[in-house]
Amino acid sequence: MEKENKLPWGLRDTLLVLLGLLVAGYSTGLVFRVSGWQLSLVYRYLLVGLAQAIAVLAGLHYFVRWKNGLGFSALGLKAEGVGRAFVAGLAGGLGLFFLVIITGALLQTMFPNPSPQPFADLVTNARGPADLVIPLFLGTVLAPLTEELYFRGFLFPALRDRYGLRAGLVGSGAIFALLHLDLWRFLPLALGGIGLAYLYDRTGNILASIIAHATWNTIMILLLYFALRWV
């Protein structure tokens, strides 16, 4: 028997948006290599991030608004319960930060001296607060907004609708981690993705996971920046 209120998009739609994200990112990077533009790494990150964000938002607009005639409330963007979602997001983001830090520390005892993420290099190489503007924008605004709308608002419900809650949580978290292209940090990132999906499922408001993601990233960025200056 078919479920009532069945989700109007399916896994094929989520994969097409994901493909658009990948194509946008790799195409932008390819333009830099082919054209020979001499842009610093931070500006390359910014342009790739913007290209990916545009691809994701365009895909979501097509499948949610244009194809199915729905508002972005279908992705969890709701006006009601904003205060509760904000508080839940702050608490969830702090909890996820500690979860990821502890998991990463345990992994480091087994696999010491992992290579740093390229994004982490942007932060650690910052010479002053002005150099943090773009990394903070990417990590606390652009990534939380676009990644939560896609991974938690779009992909997670499609997986949950077809395979159930547990598979939706684990599947969306695993895909989220894989897209960061960092095998060593796969487990911490997957756990973080699962936590963000669980937060969205419990609150029903994607703002909670956006705030949590932004909180997690902000703490990590500031910790990376100030840790080297305190040593």
Image (cartoon, rainbow, N blue to C red):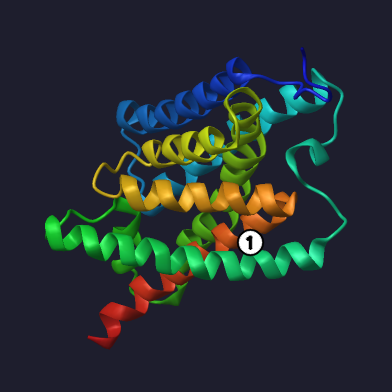
What residue is at 68 percent from the left and 52 percent from the top? 202
Q: As shown in the figure, which amino acid type bears the numbered disc 1?
A: Ile
What residue is at 81 percent from the left and 27 percent from the top? 65
Left or right relative to 100: residue 195: right
Q: Quadrant of residue 120?
A: bottom left
Q: Quadrant of residue 85?
A: bottom right
Q: Residue tagged by mark 1?
A: 211
Of residues 213 and 100, the one nearer the viewer is 100
- Considering the numbered disc 1 on the image, is that residue within a helix, a strand or a loop? helix
How far across and down, in percent of the image, does residue 153 sit? 67, 39
Assign the C terminus to one quadrant of the image.
bottom left
How far across and down, in percent of the image, does residue 229 sit? 29, 83
How far across and down, in percent of the image, does residue 97 sit? 45, 66
* Extreme residue toward the front, this view: 1
50, above or below 212, in the image? above
How many neighbours does mark 1 have within 10 angstroms: few (below 14), some (14-19), or many (20 or more)? Answer: many
What residue is at 79 percent from the left and 17 percent from the top? 67
Total marks shown come to 1
176, above or below 96, in the image? above
